[in-house]
Every structure is written in structure tokens, then in C-alpha cells.
Image (cartoon, rainbow, N blue to C red):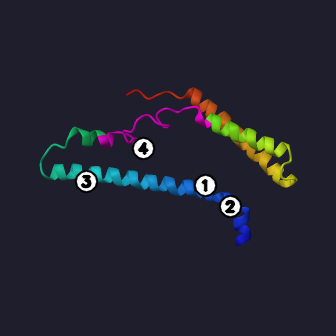
């Protein structure tokens, strides 16, 4: 068991992302479910629900009315982040810092993956169109 954890420690990060995304989806589901229940209570009372409740159901699930953030303003920070990580890992693998060829090859492969993510982020940032209000 310990050997597995020593070899695959990095799986903690995608698993944490997976759990966080699931938690976010659960919270969004509960928020929309509560909005629907509130609209049903207005309908049962024979009253017209407020327009804000109807608009809350019409907007996308992941839009919370917060000021423009990464989803609304797809910036270039991903390009810089992935590019810097790729450059750093490539540099570390090229100077043979750890003295292990297998580990250096793994770092080089990781730098290629991060460079591909940086290129994909460039394409996404250039082609991003801000949604019209």
C-alpha cells in the first residue's frame, strides 16, 4: 500500500479537483432546487412569483452573479501559469538536477504536457468572446 502511495502521490490533486467539482455541482443543484420549491410555494398560494426568482432559474447554473472572474473574463493567467511550469520543468530536466535519468525523462514529459496546455490556453484566450449582457 505504501509503495502505491509513494508512486502515485500526485493523484491526490486530480482527486481533490474531482471532489471539489462534485461539491460545487451539489451546491448548485441544491440552490436551484430551493428556487424551484420557492416558486412552487408561490404557485400553491396563487401568487405570481417575483421576477428575480424566474431570472434565477434562467441563468446558467454556474453563474452566481459575482463580478467578472475567470469564467466571465477568460484571462491569460493560464497561459503564463502553464508556460512557466513547462519552462521550469524543462529546465530542471535538462540540467539533470536530480541525477536520475528516469525522473528527468518524467519531468521532460510533464513539461511537454504543460506546454500543450499553454498552447491550448492561448487558443482559448484568443478565441474567447465575452457573453453579451
Is 131 rendered above or below residue 66? above
Magenta: main secondary structure equals loop
- At a point 12% along the width and 48% down the height, the residue shown is 46
Q: CA distance from mark 2 to mark 3?
A: 43 Å
Q: Earlier in the sequence, mark 4 or mark 2?
A: 2
Are the residues flagged by discs 4 and 1 in contact, CB closer than 8 Å? no
Foreground: disc 3 or disc 1? 1
- The numbered dot on residue 14 is 1
Q: Which residues are magenta?
A: 56-78
Q: CA distance from mark 1 to mark 2?
A: 10 Å
Q: CA distance from mark 4 to mark 2?
A: 30 Å
Foreground: disc 2 or disc 3? 2
87 relative position to 43: left or right: right
Q: Earlier in the sequence, mark 2 or mark 3?
A: 2
Q: Earlier in the sequence, mark 4 or mark 1?
A: 1
Secondary element at tag 1: helix
Foreground: disc 4 or disc 2? 2
Secondary element at tag 2: helix
Q: Which residue is mark 3?
A: 37
- Front-most of 70 and 116? 70
Q: Which residue is mark 4?
A: 62
Amino acid at each position: 500500500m505504501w509503495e502505491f502511495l509513494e508512486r502515485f502521490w500526485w493523484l491526490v490533486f486530480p482527486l481533490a479537483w474531482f471532489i471539489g467539482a462534485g461539491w460545487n455541482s451539489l451546491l448548485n443543484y441544491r440552490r436551484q432546487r430551493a428556487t424551484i420549491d420557492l416558486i412552487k410555494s408561490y404557485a400553491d398560494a396563487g401568487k405570481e412569483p417575483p421576477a428575480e426568482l424566474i431570472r434565477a432559474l434562467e441563468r446558467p447554473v454556474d453563474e452566481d452573479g459575482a463580478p467578472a472572474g475567470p469564467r466571465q473574463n477568460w484571462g491569460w493567467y493560464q497561459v503564463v501559469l502553464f508556460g512557466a511550469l513547462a519552462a521550469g520543468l524543462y529546465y530542471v530536466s535538462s540540467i539533470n538536477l536530480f541525477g536520475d535519468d528516469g525522473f528527468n525523462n518524467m519531468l521532460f514529459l510533464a513539461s511537454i504536457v504543460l506546454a500543450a496546455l499553454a498552447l491550448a490556453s492561448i487558443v482559448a484566450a484568443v478565441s474567447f468572446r465575452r457573453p453579451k449582457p
